Amino acid sequence: MNIIDFHTHRQDATQALISVSPWDFKPQPGLYYSVGYHPWLNLETLTDDDFGLLEKCARHPQVLAIGETGMDSLRGSDLNIQEAVFIRHLKLAADLNKPVVVHCVRTAQQILATRRQEGFTAVPLVIHGMRGNEHLARTWFEAGCYLSYGARFNPAALHITPLDRLLIETDEADETIQEVAAQVASVLHLTADQVLDLAATNTRRLLLGQCD
């Protein structure tokens, strides 16, 4: 397992964790996935069968993480519904010992409070598409979270991110993961290859024991 791109929606991506909904999960040989219900979906329509499908997919050996899931104050279902669905993802992740890929828009404190109040502080969170400032970055990594940076990010936040909590991603951008690595490297005064190695090492540590 050598995953560099921690979060992408490109279905044919290699060395990547491909994010899909349970409805779209059609695993291909040699590829790895995260599976979850995105907060932009009509979450109020989810049924017990939908959550049963999520659990079935999450137990597949090629699924290494849960999500993306989370909360978005600007888009999607009512925040109370988003929170309830997020909690179900956290519980599943705790049961399966897998990290959670988090979508967060202006809900950082609520996400961390929910995780704490529901007793899931041991579940690793990966904040994907991190674009917030250095204060927000510090809030996340002090709570034990990993931060995944894509093509657009706040350089000050990236600069203070501990290297052992750093991940990189393409998400839905046109840039390749090598181009993202080069952008990150320019801020950290590293080479792109060093950033790629860091990303692979951190991903392996986070997912250790979940695949060969």
Image (cartoon, rainbow, N blue to C red):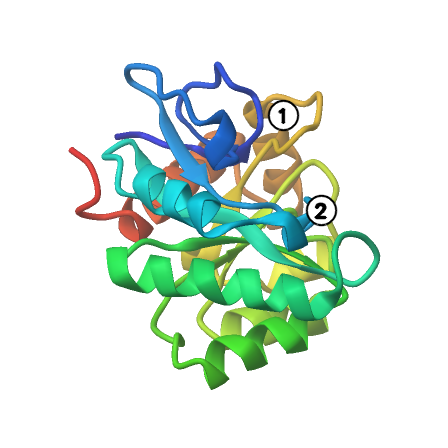
Secondary structure under the numbered disc 1 in the rendered image:
helix
Q: Nearer the viewer, residue 7 or 45?
A: 45
- In the image, residue 13 sits, relative to residue 46, either above or below, namely above
Q: Amino acid at mark 1?
A: Glu
Nearer to the camera, 206 or 26: 26
Quadrant where the N terminus lies?
top left
The residue lying at 45 percent from left, 62 percent from top is 88
Residue 165, image quadrant: bottom left
The quadrant in which residue 160 appears is bottom right
32 w.r.t. 54: above or below: above
Q: Position of residue 89 (x, y in %)?
A: 45, 58
Residue drawn where x is 35% and y is 58% of the image: 93
Instruction: Judge left or right: residue 183 versus residue 204.
Output: right
114 or 203: which is nearer to us? 114
Q: Position of residue 150 (x, y in %)?
A: 64, 39
Label 2: how many Cα within 10 Å (few below 14, some 14–19, many 20+)? some
Marks 2/1: CA–CA distance = 28 Å
Which residue in the protein does label 2 denote?
Answer: 40
x and y percentages locating residue 179 in the rendered image = 63, 25
Residue at numbered disc 1: 179
Q: Whole-percent x and y of residue 189?
A: 59, 45
Based on the displayed image, in which of its 4 quarters is residue 61 positioned? top left
Which residue is pictured at 52% across the width and 35% down the height? 21
The tag on residue 64 is none
Of badges 2 and 1, nearer the viewer stands: 2
